[in-house]
Image (cartoon, rainbow, N blue to C red):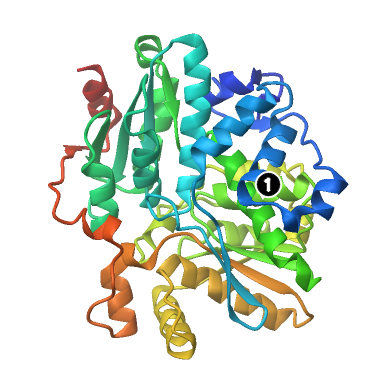
Amino acid sequence: MRLYSTKTPSLKATLEEAVFRSLPPDNGLYMPEVIPQVSAAFLQQIEQLTFNEIAFEVSKTLLGDDISQADVRKIVEQAFDFEAPVVQIEENTHVLELFHGPSMAFKDFGARFMAALMSHFLAQSQQEIQILVATSGDTGGAVAQGFFNVPGISVTILYPSGKVSDIQEKQLTTLGGNVRALEVAGTFDDCQALVKQAFLDPELSQKFNLASANSINIARLIPQSFYYFSAYAQLKYLGQPVVFSVPSGNFGNLSAGLLAKKMGLPVAHFLAVTNRNHVVPSYLKNGEYLPKPSVETISNAMDVGNPSNFVRLTRFFCDDWQQVKQDISGFWFDDTQTRQAMTQVFDATGYIMCPHTAVAYLGLKEYQTLHPQKNTGVLLSTAHYAKFLDVVEGALGVEEIEVPQRLSALLSKPKVATQISKHFADFKAFLLQ
């Protein structure tokens, strides 16, 4: 698997180089030079395969000869001991539940696969690496769980102070060991900027083997494509076009869906659905990409004003806005609409959605109103509702919602985090200590 930089296509990298560098030296993003196609035979029998069998087939198609098939299978089995079930809640409306992993968020798919892939490479090279990751909510918990006590890897997680839920914060500040948390006085965009600047700093690059576990790393996108294939497999029997509604922040999730489609997955359309941080829906409407400072919402994991993966999203279409619009429609909704959707679905069906899931639901309903022809609508549920207790209980008017034991056990653990400013000099000094 050969990759190139989105800024300087002549800058090439192997898979191993791209995984550990995370970013090319020109601050672009890595993209596959060639996107191989899955076989027709695979798609014909996909409904008969387990999630891990699907993941293995997609992995070996993408990775080619970089890793032996025996090792690919081992990586898949090490990463995934949980499923991604599709649940119907209304006619033509299905929820792809991505919260059945250890941190109960969709980021588990990317983090665990990435940890297994890095372990495979590190076992051969005997190197040690320092992972830097910025989180707006769920990435931190998934990375903390996925890389906890993995030999040869230490992890530093940056998160915006006061802008993640209590449970999200506990997930990334209570493990200890090889995982440490930095509470940044700023926004997610500030955290992300610190990580990117660290990779471009010569002194840090010379002292540490730095890598990122954010969706800027291609190793995060590859496994996120698996559950699009799995959802199609579960719904193939309906024989209708499939539309995916993706709640979006940094746009890694949607980029993974586009990767799946480019590999041959039959997808009729994608919906890029955001909260008030709607720079991408605005781009889809008028062709102008105008990053803005992020604003705080109840769907905090999507509070991103300058999505890193935007360049990947457009590169899949040769940066042609007209082509992008053919495959993707954009919608955005505010907090009031989000709460109303959570209440409406709960009252009608008893199904509880987290605020991010509710944003995706609203986008799907809007699209189906505008396009009433028959389709199978799939909205991605990116996190368990219990991770947003105050918001969910307030929206539904319920005093106590049952919290899974793996989350409730965190609440009594002490938070351990170092507070730093949003200035790079302070972050660099922390790393060099």
Q: Quadrant of residue 132?
A: top left
Residue at numbered disc 1: 54
Q: What residue type is labelled 1?
A: Ile
How many numbered tags mark residues here? 1
* Along the line of sight, the residue nearer the viewer: 200 or 3: 3
Please determine whether, in this image, residue 236 is positioned above or below residue 15: below
Q: Does the image show residue 23?
A: no
Q: Where is residue 74 in the image (x, y as percent from the top left)?
A: 57, 31
200 vs 217, left or right, is left
Q: In which quarter of the image is the N terminus?
A: top right
Locate the C terminus and report the quarter of the image it occupies: top left
**Residue drawn at the location 32% of the way across and 62% of the way down:** 387
Judging depth in this view, the residue of 247 and 122 nearest the camera is 122
Crowding at dot 1, Cα within 10 Å, few <14 / some 14-19 / many 20+, comes out as many
Of residues 99 and 267, the one nearer the viewer is: 99
The residue lying at 37 percent from left, 19 percent from top is 152
Q: Is disc 1 placed on a helix, strand or loop? A: helix
**As drawn, 95 above or below 428:** below
Res. 385 visible in picture = yes
Does residue 16 sit above or below 63 in this rendering? above
**In this view, 109 is above or below 10:** below
Asked where in the image residue 60 lies, by quadrant, the reply is top right
User: As drawn, is 53 to the left or to the right of 408?
Assistant: right
Task: Point out residue 422 in the picture as x, y percentages from the top left corner.
Answer: 27, 38
Q: Can you give x and y, in whole percent of width and height, for residue 407 in the image?
A: 28, 57
On the image, the x and y values in percent for residue 94 come to 61, 73
Q: Residue at x 52, y 61 (%)?
A: 278
At 76% across and 65% down in the image, what residue appears?
Answer: 236
